[in-house]
Amino acid sequence: MTQIDGHIDRRQFALALAAVPLSLSAAARAARAAAKARVVIVGGGPAGATVAVTLKRASPDLDVTLIEPQTQYTSCFYSNHFIGGFMPITRITNTYDGLTALGINVVHAHATGFDAAKREVAIEKGANLRYDRLVVAPGIGFKYGAIEGYSEAASYFMPHAWSGGRQSKLLRERLDDMEDGGLVVIAAPRNPYRCPPGPYERACLIANYLQREKPKSKLVILDPKMAFSKQAVFEEAFAKYYKDIIELRLTNDIDDMSVARVDPKTGEVVTKSGETFKAAVANIIPDQTAGAIALSSGLAEGDWCPIVPETFRSAKMDNVYVVGDATIANDMPKSAFSASNQARAVAGQILADLTGAERPPAAYRNTCWSMLTPGDSVKIGADYAPGDAKGKHILVAKDPFISKPGETAELRKENYEESLAWYETLTADMFAKTASATGKHPHAGRG
């Protein structure tokens, strides 16, 4: 159990985990029956790592291999807190040591393809790995070519910071190097994309940084959409906390505020409506796809991977599950909470496949918190279950909830503390941390 500011809230933790329960007897049956079975997982983020840990804890004799090229994982979720100066990057960086200690085979390499007939995963500079079940959790890729002048190379000068690690550091470095009075431009992507409220939380936390460090600077949001997640509470925050700093430019019937062209050398950002902004710091977040291996291996239809909503089995390949941001999960957004929740369900499905254990219910949950300013956070979420909508069998939201303008400071602070508890609990779970490694408050120092 994680301790936050000296208080333990078991109800919040249980709600945040939304774990698929496995009875002791079911776990024992799984351990015996799955002793010779092999599960290979591609991708070590919240989806892939959580599947690996959940399986290994439920069935210690199961052969579980996680393929992840990075030896450290710096999360994209909570990176806005680092970029805004509320958290050192070490607080969102973890190793896979806990997984190795648990008995999971962690292979730091790139997976290059799948052979469904042979049930094999090809990896760079190594022998193919055989599997009985394969989990693909590749995260996202970027449509660099959709914006003239923007490329992977250009992202060094105009970082998207929509993947953790180096990109987050680059954006923070650009802000630190900017002279007071410079313009920060955030270009939001089109739907669907990872973390729908993320660009607007980022705007708040960068604006907070500007207030503290560079009060003459301004920030403009260029948005190709006409509406966005949690819009009412974000607009309230823009007016309440950052009235003279943030300018929101949404697309409307006349003006298309999507970015048409950028010049990394000059900092120019040009919209499709023809407006030009000279950015001292340009945070260009491109439109997104499933991770590259999902596209190249035949798991995707268009940009994303179709799944069976009851189980998250791939709709394109036998004996394969696809989990997390890469999926077409319909109403369920692409978030770390969604990914970890789906992962626990998929672990239960795999144990049922291999052992005949009872299958978990097809019920999922997401909650997403956004920090507006220290001590003031808002949230959105829902339960999700298979259902029929618009003539299709898909995942449908049930009992949605969302923060509203005008809420009390006490409620917003409760949201804030709840989000910190969730972060600590999620990362402790996905990286199989020991209890002694999870007691530190995530905002213990500024970065």
Image (spheres, rainbow, N blue to C red):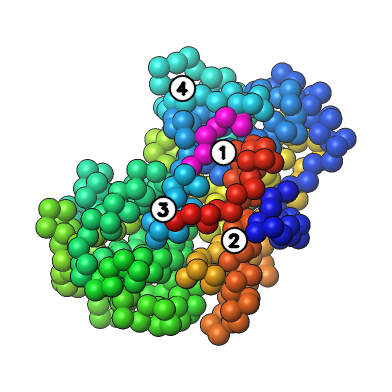
Disc nearer the start of the sequence (4/3): 4
Distance in Å between CA atoms under marks 2 and 3? 19 Å
* Amino acid on which disc 1 is placed: Gly
Image depth: mark 1 or mark 3 in front: 3
Query: Are the residues tagged 4 and 3 within 8 Å (C-beta)?
Result: no
Q: Which residue is mark 1?
A: 48
- Mark 1 crowdedness (10 Å alpha carbons): few <14, some 14-19, many ≥20: many
Q: Which residue is mark 3?
A: 447
Q: Secondary structure at mark 2?
A: helix
Q: Position of residue 13 (x, y in %)?
A: 71, 56
Image depth: mark 2 or mark 1 in front: 2
Read off the magenta span: 93-99
- Mark 2 crowdedness (10 Å alpha carbons): few <14, some 14-19, many ≥20: many
Which of 14/287 is in front? Answer: 14
* Amino acid on which disc 3 is placed: Gly
Disc nearer the start of the sequence (2/4): 4
Query: Are the residues tagged 2 and 4 within 8 Å (C-beta)?
Result: no
